[in-house]
Structures are given as structure tokens and as C-alpha cells.
Image (cartoon, rainbow, N blue to C red):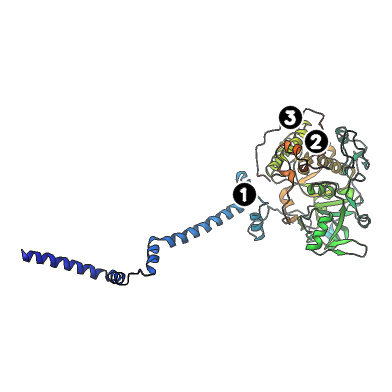
Amino acid sequence: MESDLQKSISSRLNRRGDRSNLNPQAKDFDVGLFSSGRVPQDYPMKIVWKKGFIRLVLVGGILWMLLILIALLFHIWSCQSSVSFLSAMCNKDSKVYTMLDTMGLVTKPHRCPIPVSNDPDKIVIPTERTSDKVVKKLLYVTEDEVPNNSSESSPLFGGYISWKQREESFKLKSNMKVHCGFIKGGGAEMDPVDIKYVKKCKFVVASGIFDGYDIPHQPSNISLRSKKLFCFLMVVDEVSLEFMRENTTVKEDNAGGKWVGIWRLVLLKNQPYDEPRRNGKVPKIITHRLFPQAHYSIWIDGKMELVVDPLLILERYLWRGKNTFAIAQHKHHRSIYEEADANKRRKRYARPLIDLHMKIYYYEGMKPWSSSKKTISDVPEGAIIIREHTAVNNLFSCLWFNEVHLFTPRDQLSFGYVAYRLGDAFEFFMFPNCEYNSLFVLHPHTREHSSPIEWVKQLDQLKKNSNLKESRGGLGLFTPYPGDLNSVVLPQITRTSKAG
């Protein structure tokens, strides 16, 4: 009995000794633990490491950075994608896209070779102007009577155009007199020193900057011949001129003219409209009114840098094909109703006013674009306009401006309508959009543009808050229309491309 008990005790001691030998660190720890009563400092970290927390944080951080990188790459790819659904998600006005563009991570717009001549010095300039076949003489209304039922007492730059006057202006005659801006007392006055300078300009490259949204970008690849032949005229307002003085070098010549590099600044005082975008349509659309001695003009938006010699542009888009008016095709839209839908989604103007604008056009017979139409598109990319200042082209420009004056300032909506109303009398060359993107380098605005009216979703908002409504532009949208617009149902929009 005793021998069995001793054997049992001996075996337990042996097993305890074996365990001690197998884990000597545990033994040391036990001794230290109970002898000092403290836990070593590295022991919690060892426990955490064993549980994999630190490794989890590191892996999570790496995965998060990869997700951000993937999202940025997807953003860049979607902006360049030809798939409508994907490209529609791109917002090229976002700060993220601008940052990526600045870093050189965004691919440039689709471009294609322009079939221009190689040497500007070899271009033969036509000695004779294009003859006017339909409209022989065009005069402009310069003084306007204020309607008796109007609450306005001051002159409007674009005039108080009645519905009857508007309709008559589309009826072509040999001698015509139409509204075309510059009503006396309506604003947009030019300094005498600038009036004197532009009288010598027969070949014009024109641009405009209003409300300090851009600074002039110097054209490149300009030949010495074109520098002598063309006047590079940058139309600005007081705000933009002051902005340029603070952010770039403005020089003044002996005659009092102001210059930024090759650009001669042309100051327009007393802006005619509340909306800077509408003010920008004055030099853009009715260029011939600002520079009446010009035979040819090339308009480029203020945020663009021209990279092709202007003489080569005239030869390619006008003289080679015997055209007198050239403009690029819009990259995404061909129907003005699709373009209007995009404007509403991107808050380019009050949504109900855009709808009202389109209802008037639809009521007056403007159908959505289709392949049966003679034009390849009803929607232009209006940042570049190339034209010879013929009577018909000047008439078209006046009527186009009148639509912008009466309705929304979105000139891409009204271009196709005016072309439709003038029919075969107005001929124009609409060239591929990829060529348009090859003519210039596009720079971002100095700041984002925002106007209170862009956020209006219901007409009641304009009625309740008069501060949202423009006071000198778009008055045709608030003048009773001589037709039943309530019965007009706009065509359903099937998106065929991105918002644009």
C-alpha cells in the first residue's frame, strides 16, 4: 500500500518536472510574477501582436489607400469613357478632377489631326468679299421705345423686343432693320481710345473675360505674318481688368491702350446684364457690332489658349470650302432638347425657365434632331466661332443674340433654332469636335461660377423672391406668349451620351 502511494507521488513529481523543463520561460515568469508582483511592460504588446491587431491596422490602411487609388483611377477612366452610363458620372467641374488635371493624370480631350496648311506665309487671302445674295442691306435698331405696359423705365441693351418684332425679324428681305444690342443708354460702352484702335482691325481674333473668371492665355504658334495681320482683342469688364492688374502684367502704350502680352484689352463699361455669362455673349455673338470694320473674326472663349495660327484656321474652315461661317459640332449632343436636359441636370440655369424656353421652340416647330435633317447637328460647341462678316452672317448673329437676350443665356440652345428659322439662306460649316479640341488648350477657370437663379427649381421661387430673377435679361420668359404653351408636351429625352 505504501509502495503504491510512493509510486503515485513520484510519478506526479516527475510529470511536474517535465513540464518545468519544457517551458523554462514560464517558470521564470512565474517566479518573477509572484516575487515582484508586477507584469513586464512588453507583455501586453506581445498579447496584442499575437492577436494580430497591429497587422490588421496595417493591412486595413494599405487596403484603404488602394481603394482611394482605384476610385481616382476609375474617376479618370470614366471621364474619358465612351460608355454613356460611365461618362455621365464624370464631373469635370469638380475640384478632384481639376487637381488630377493639374497633376497631369487626366488624359487630354480627344483630338485629331487638323488638315491645315503648313506655312501661313503661303496662304492666299481672297481679294474679294463673299457677295450677299439674300440680304443686301442690314440696319440696326439703336433707340427703343419702352412698352406702355412695362414697369421698366430705363433702356435695355437688347431692347424691348415684342413677339411681333421677333417674328418679323425672321422674314428675310433685301433690306432689313433688326434689334442687335447696343440700344442707346443700355450699357456696354467702349472707351474712345479703344473705338479708335479697333477701326483699323479687318482680321480679328476676339475673346472675352467677365467678372474675373479667367486671365488671358497667350496664343502660341503664331506666325509673324499673322501678328501683323490680326488684331488680338480681349473684351473685359471693370472687375476683370482689376483682377488682371493684380494677377498678371498689364502694360499701357502711349495712346492709353492696355495690353496683356499679345492681347489688346477692350474695356466695356456699364455691363448690360446682371448675369456675367449673359454679358459674355455680347462680344461672342455680335462681334461685328463691336468691331464693325472687321471682315473676318475668330472668337475663342476666355479660358482657351489658341495653339494654331489664325490664318491657317481661316484657310481651313472658310476659304478652302468656300464657307463663310464655321463652328464645331458638340461632342455629346445633337438635339437642343437633349442639351437642355443636360443644362438642367448640371444647374446651368433655372430648370423651369429652360423648360419654358424649349416649349416656345417646340411650339414654333423646332423638332428634335434626326438623321433626316440637313445639318449634322443642332447643337454647336460654341467656344470657337469662325466667320466672315457678311450681311446674312451678321443677321444670323443678331437674331441669335436676340434669343439669348429674350430667353436663357445658354446660347447652344438657341443656335439651332435660329438656323432652322433662316433655313437655306444661312449656310454654315459644322466641323468635327475632335478638330475643335486640336485648336486650343483648355484652362480651368480661376474660380467656380454660381448664380442664384441656377438653383431655382420652381417658378414660384422667382415670384416669391424677386432677387433671384434677372432684371435686364430673359424678360421674354416673363412676357405673355401669344400661344397656348400649356398644351405643349416636350419630347421625351433618351440620354444617348453624358451630361456634357
Question: What is the C-alpha distance between the residues marked 2 and 3?
Answer: 17 Å
Instruction: Give residue 98's quadrant in the image.
Output: bottom right
Q: Quadrant of the N terminus?
A: bottom left
Q: In the image, 461: left or right of 64?
A: right
Residue type at tag 2:
Phe
> Which amino acid type is marked by label 3?
Val
Q: Which residue is mark 1?
A: 81
Image spot of residue 385 (x, y percent) = 80, 49
At x 70%, y 33%, the residue is 491
In the rendering, at what x and y percent does residue 69 appear?
Answer: 56, 57
Identity, as a three-letter code, of the amino acid under mark 1: Ser
Q: Which mark is residue 488?
A: 3
Indicate the position of residue 405 as horizontal and vertical percent values.
83, 42
Q: Is residue 51 above or below residue 372?
A: below
Q: Closer to the camera: disc 1 or disc 3?
A: 3
Q: Nearer the viewer, mark 1 or mark 2?
A: 2
- Spatial CA distance of label 1 from label 2 is 40 Å
- State which tag comes first along the sequence, 2 or 3: 2
**Image position of 181 with respect to 32: above or below:** above
Decide: is 56 above or below 155: below
Question: Mark 1 and mark 3: span between their CA atoms?
Answer: 36 Å
Image spot of residue 257 (x, y percent): 90, 61
SS of the residue under disc 1: loop
In the rendered view, does 384 fall on the left or right side of 6? right
Q: Is residue 102 left or right of residue 420?
A: left
**Tags 2 and 3 in contact by the CB under 8 Å rule?**
no
Identify the residue at the far left of this view.
Answer: 1
Mark 1 vs 3: CB contact within 8 A: no
Can you identify the residue that label 2 sits on?
Answer: 478
User: Of label 1 and label 2, which has the lower sequence position?
Assistant: 1
Residue closest to the eye, 77 or 251:
251
